[in-house]
Amino acid sequence: MKYQQIQQLLEQLSDELKSLQLWQSKPPAAAALRSVEPFAVDTLAFHQWLQFVMIPRMQVLIAQRHPLPDKMAVSPMAVQVYRGELKIHRNLIACLREIDTLVTGVDPLQAS
């Protein structure tokens, strides 16, 4: 059930990226995807990391019924990245917050 809920939220996240016109038809260069920095901040925009790293990795975990991460806090990063445009990105942030909370059992925006 949890995997199914997360899959639905990932689809919602994809839809939200598309509605914000942040969805890209072509992936970034392979080298940019090999970043070891959190959220690939050195090579990708946050929305690119969501589309080309987070969503595909989570979909693999779900499809193969692998354990989900113990710690996950993507929504605080979204709040930071979009701090000047919170109203515009509120649905995106809310979706990420739901994913974070469902995966870990903790709301990272309330945990501090």
Image: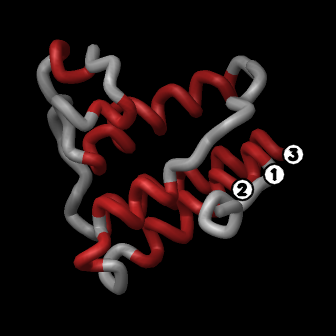
Compared to residue 27, the image places residue 24 above or below, namely: below
Amino acid at pointer 3? Met
| Residue lying at the far right of the rendered structure | 1
Disc 3 marks which residue? 1
Compared to residue 49, the image places residue 61 above or below, namely: above
Disc 2 marks which residue? 101
Give the left or right position of residue 17, taking residue 94 as reference. left
Q: Residue at x 55, y 64 (%)?
A: 95
Question: Does the residue at mark 2 contact the one at mark 1 (Cβ under 8 Å)?
Answer: yes
Question: Does the residue at mark 3 contact the one at mark 2 (Cβ under 8 Å)?
Answer: no
Disc 1 marks which residue? 105
Amino acid at pointer 1? Gly
| Residue lying at the far bottom of the rendered structure | 87
Q: Residue at x 69, y 30 (%)?
A: 69
Amino acid at pointer 2? Thr
* Quarter of the image where the N terminus is located: top right
Foreground residue, 111 or 1? 111
Give x and y (percent) for residue 9.
61, 55
- Mark 3 or mark 1, earlier in chain: 3
How many neighbours does mark 2 have within 10 angstroms: few (below 14), some (14-19), or many (20 or more)?
A: some
* Quarter of the image where the C terminus is located: bottom right
Q: Residue at x 64, y 51 (%)?
A: 100
Give x and y (percent) for residue 78.
40, 59
Give the left or right position of residue 30, taking residue 7 as reference. left
